[in-house]
C-alpha cells in the first residue's frame, strides 16, 4: 500500500490492520478547487443576470428558479465534497492474526441469513448462501448459522435440511481444494472446471451431488410436495399443518445441526457448523417490522443457543465470495490498540448479475470506491444491512466507554440440550415478546423507518463506537441486483424515501449526531439523506430551459467570443 499510514497494534506488537490515506488526495483537492471556482462563477453569473421583473415574466421567473436550482446543486456539491475530502483505505494482516491466536482462542461468530418469500427468493438461492457461509475458512465449532424464514415455509425448511446433508460433502470439498466462491450455485454457474488440486473424478462427483440436490429441490418447489425424510419428518415437519400461512403461524425454532448431538460431522470426520432454522411467530393483527423484526428475533435466539461475540448478517441473495472474510473482520476487532472501539465492519454491496455499463446503475461504483472510504475516513461507515460484522454488544444498545475491553477468550460454551434450547428460543420470538420492551427503540435493529439498518448504524456511532469499511480485492459478498425497471424503481424509491425520512426526523444525523459524531460524518450522512431532494431542481432544470428555448427566451450565456450576452438578452 502506498501513501501515509496509520496503524493499529499495541504493546509493541505489530498491528493487525493498517489505515492509509491515498496519495492522490492532493490532486483531487486541487481539482475540487477548480470546480468550486466554476460554481462560484455560475452563481455570480446567475445572480447578476436575472432579467428585470417587467421585461419578460417567463424570463424573470425562469431566472429566479434557475438561481435556486443552481444554489442547491452547488451546496449539495459542497456537501459531497466535504465528505470526499478525507478517504482512507484499509489493509488487514491475517497472518499476524493466525500467529497471535490459535483456533481455539478465536471468538465464536453467529451468522444470520434472512429470507422472506420462497417465490421471490427461491430455496436453492437461499441454501447456496447458507452453504457459502457454512464453508468459511474458520473453525466450524466456532461458527453458528441461523436462517430466519419470514415466510415460515415448509419448502424452505426442507431445503435447509437438504443443505445440512449436502454440507457434509461440500464443506470438506471447499476446504480440501480451496474452492472459491463457496456458494455451490455460484461456483458451478461460472463454468468451474476441476481445480488444480482436485482430481476430475472428485470434481464430477461433487457436481453430480449438486445436480441431484438441485433436481430434488426443483421437483419439490414445482409439486409443492415434500418427500418423506424419516429423520426430518419425525419432528421437523410436525410444526407445519394446513392452517399455517406465511402471515399467521406460531414460532418455529429447530436446530438442524447440533454439535452436541445431531449430524455433527462431515464425511472427513470434521465438525460441522451449527445450523438453526427460525420462523418467528406471525399474526395478522401484530406488527412484524419486516427485516428489522427478524434480525431482532435472531439476536435473541442466538443469544441462548450460541451467544457469539461477533455477528455477521447477510441477505439470502448475498453469498460469501471470499472464504477469509471472517478473519479479515477479526483483524479489526481484535487489534489490541485500535480495535476496542470498532463497533462494526461493513463490506461493500457488490453484484454478480450486472454487466459493465449497467443502465440501472447497480454496480454503485462511486459509492463503493469513493464515498464509502470517505465515510470511513470520518470514522463512521454506514451500516447497510448486509455484509456487515457487528460486535454483539453494539446491537444490545451498549454504550462504548474508555474502560471497555473485550475478553475475546470469554467462553460462551452453551451445552444445554437442543430440545430445551429450542423451547426457550421459541418463547423469545413470539409476537408479544417485544411489547413494552426497548427492542427496536434502544436495543437491536431500530423500527419505524424503511432504512432500519442505516439508523441502527448511526445510533451505534452515537453510542461512541466507530465503524470501518473494508473493501478487499476479492469481494467479500456478491448479491443479486434487481433486474427490471420496476424492481429498481421500488428499491430506489425505498432508499431515497427512507434517507429523506431519516434526515427530516429525530434520527437526523445533525440532531442525533450533534456533539457525538464528527461534523464531516454528519454531512456525509446527508449526502444520501438529501439525495431525494435533488429530483426537484433536476426536474426544473430539465423542463424550464427547454420551455424558455421554445418561447425564444434565453437563460444561458450565448457564445459570441465573450460572456456579455445572457439571460433574456
Ligand atoms: O419482512 C421481511 C422483508 C425482507 N426480509 C429480508 O431482508 C432482506 C433485504 O430485503 P430486499 O427486499 O432484498 O431489499 P433490498 O432493497 O435488496 O435490500 C437492501 O436495502 C435494505 C434497506 O436498506 C437492507 O436492509 C438490505 O440489507 C439491503 O440489501 C432479504 O434477505 C429479505 O429476505 C425479511 O427477512 N423480512
Ligand atoms: Mn435484496
Image (spheres, rainbow, N blue to C red):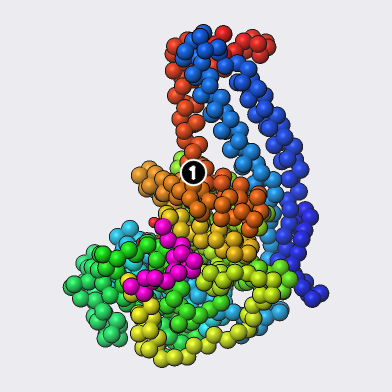
Which of the two residues, 166 or 362, is positioned nearer the viewer here? 362
- Residue depicted at 71% across the width and 79% down the height: 100
Confirm whether the magenta stretch covers residue 434: yes
Viewer-closest of 454 and 490:
454
As rendered, which of 518 and 167 lies closer to the eye?
518
Residue 538, given in percent of the width and then of the height, sits at 49, 31
Give, as a single range, the part of the protein colored magenta: 432-448
Q: In which quadrant will I find the C terminus?
A: top right
Mark 1 closeness class: few <14, some 14–19, many ≥20 residues within 10 Å: some
Report the residue that reaches farthest toward the left.
242
* Residue 162 visible: no
In this figure, which residue is indicated by the disc labeled 1? 361
Say which element carries label 1.
Answer: loop
Percent x, y for residue 144?
Answer: 48, 78
Vertical side of 42 occupied by 535: above or below: below
Q: Residue at x 49, y 88 (%)?
A: 414
Assess whether residue 368 is covered by the magenta stretch. no
Instruction: State whether residue 192 is above or below residue 147.
Output: above
Judged by its main secondary structure, the magenta piece is: loop
Residue 343, can we see it?
yes
- Image coordinates of residue 196 in percent, x first then y, are 57, 69
Q: Position of residue 69 (x, y in %)?
A: 53, 29
Place residue 566 in its image quadrant: top right
Q: Residue at horizontal 37%, vertical 65%?
A: 115
Front-lying residue, 203 or 187: 187
Q: Quadrant where the N terminus lies? A: bottom right
Which quadrant holds residue 20? bottom right
Residue appearing at x 43%, y 55% in the figure: 449
557 left or right, relative to 242: right
Amino acid at each position: 500500500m502506498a501513501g501515509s499510514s496509520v496503524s493499529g497494534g499495541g504493546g509493541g506488537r505489530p498491528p493487525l490492520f493498517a489505515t492509509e490515506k491515498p496519495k492522490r488526495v492532493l490532486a483531487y483537492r486541487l481539482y475540487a478547487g477548480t470546480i468550486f471556482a466554476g460554481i462560484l462563477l455560475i452563481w455570480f453569473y446567475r445572480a447578476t443576470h436575472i432579467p428585470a421583473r417587467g421585461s419578460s415574466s417567463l424570463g424573470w421567473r425562469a431566472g429566479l428558479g434557475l438561481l435556486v436550482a443552481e444554489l442547491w446543486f452547488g451546496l449539495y456539491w459542497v456537501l459531497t465534497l466535504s465528505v470526499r475530502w478525507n478517504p482512507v483505505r484499509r489493509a488487514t494482516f491475517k497472518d499476524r492474526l493466525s500467529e497471535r491466536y490459535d483456533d481455539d482462542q478465536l471468538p465464536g461468530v453467529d451468522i444470520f441469513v434472512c429470507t422472506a418469500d420462497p417465490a421471490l427468493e427461491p430455496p436453492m438461492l437461499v441454501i447456496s448462501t447458507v452453504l457459502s457461509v457454512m464453508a468459511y475458512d474458520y473453525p466450524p465449532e466456532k461458527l453458528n448459522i441461523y436462517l430466519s424464514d419470514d415466510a415460515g415455509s415448509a419448502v424452505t425448511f426442507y431445503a435447509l435440511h437438504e443443505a445440512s446433508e449436502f454440507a457434509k460433502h461440500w464443506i470438506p470439498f471447499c476446504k480440501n481444494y480451496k474452492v472459491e466462491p463457496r456458494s455451490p450455485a455460484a461456483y458451478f454457474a461460472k463454468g468451474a472446471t476441476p481445480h488444480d488440486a482436485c482430481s476430475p473424478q472428485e470434481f464430477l462427483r461433487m457436481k453430480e451431488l449438486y445436480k441431484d440436490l438441485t433436481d430434488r429441490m426443483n421437483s419439490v418447489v414445482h409439486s409443492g410436495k415434500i418427500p418423506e425424510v424419516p429423520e426430518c419428518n419425525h419432528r421437523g415437519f410436525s410444526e407445519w399443518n394446513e392452517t399455517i400461512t406465511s402471515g399467521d403461524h406460531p414460532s418455529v425454532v429447530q436446530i438442524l445441526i447440533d454439535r452436541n448431538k445431531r449430524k455433527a460431522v462431515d464425511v472427513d470426520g470434521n465438525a460441522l457448523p451449527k445450523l438453526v432454522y427460525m420462523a418467528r411467530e406471525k399474526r395478522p393483527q401484530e406488527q412484524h417490522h419486516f427485516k428489522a423484526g427478524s434480525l431482532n428475533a435472531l439476536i435473541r435466539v442466538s443469544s441462548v443457543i450460541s451467544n457469539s461475540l461477533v455477528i455477521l448478517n447477510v441477505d439470502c441473495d448475498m453469498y460469501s465470495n471470499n472464504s477469509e472474510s471472517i478473519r479479515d473482520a477479526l483483524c479489526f476487532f481484535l487489534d489490541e490498540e485500535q480495535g476496542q472501539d470498532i463497533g462494526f465492519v461493513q463490506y461493500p454491496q457488490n453484484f454478480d448479475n450486472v454487466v459493465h455499463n449497467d443502465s440501472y446503475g447497480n454496480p454503485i461504483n462511486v459509492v463503493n470506491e469513493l464515498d464509502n472510504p470517505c465515510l470511513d475516513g470520518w470514522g463512521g461507515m454506514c451500516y447497510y444491512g448486509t455484509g456487515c460484522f457487528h460486535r454483539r454488544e453494539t446491537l444490545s444498545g451498549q454504550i462504548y466507554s474508555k474502560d471497555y475491553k473485550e475478553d475475546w477468550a470469554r467462553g460462551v460454551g452453551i451445552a444445554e440440550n437442543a430440545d430445551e434450547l429450542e423451547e426457550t428460543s421459541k418463547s423469545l420470538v413470539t409476537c408479544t415478546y417485544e411489547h413494552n420492551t426497548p427492542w427496536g427503540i434502544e436495543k437491536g435493529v431500530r423500527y419505524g423507518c424503511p432504512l432500519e439498518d442505516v439508523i441502527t448504524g448511526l445510533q451505534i456511532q452515537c453510542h461512541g463506537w466507530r465503524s470501518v469499511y473494508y473493501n478487499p480485492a476479492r469481494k467479500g459478498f456478491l448479491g443479486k441486483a434487481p433486474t427490471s425497471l420496476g424492481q429498481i424503481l421500488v428499491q430506489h424509491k425505498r432508499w431515497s424515501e427512507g434517507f429523506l425520512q431519516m434526515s427530516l426526523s429525530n434520527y437526523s444525523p445533525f440532531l442525533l449526531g450533534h456533539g457525538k459524531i464528527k461534523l464531516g460524518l454528519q454531512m456525509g450522512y446527508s449526502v444520501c439523506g438529501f439525495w431525494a431532494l435533488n429530483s426537484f431542481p433536476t426536474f426544473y432544470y430539465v423542463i424550464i430551459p427547454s420551455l424558455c428555448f421554445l418561447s425564444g427566451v434565453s437563460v444561458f450565456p450565448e457564445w459570441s467570443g465573450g460572456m456579455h450576452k445572457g439571460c433574456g438578452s
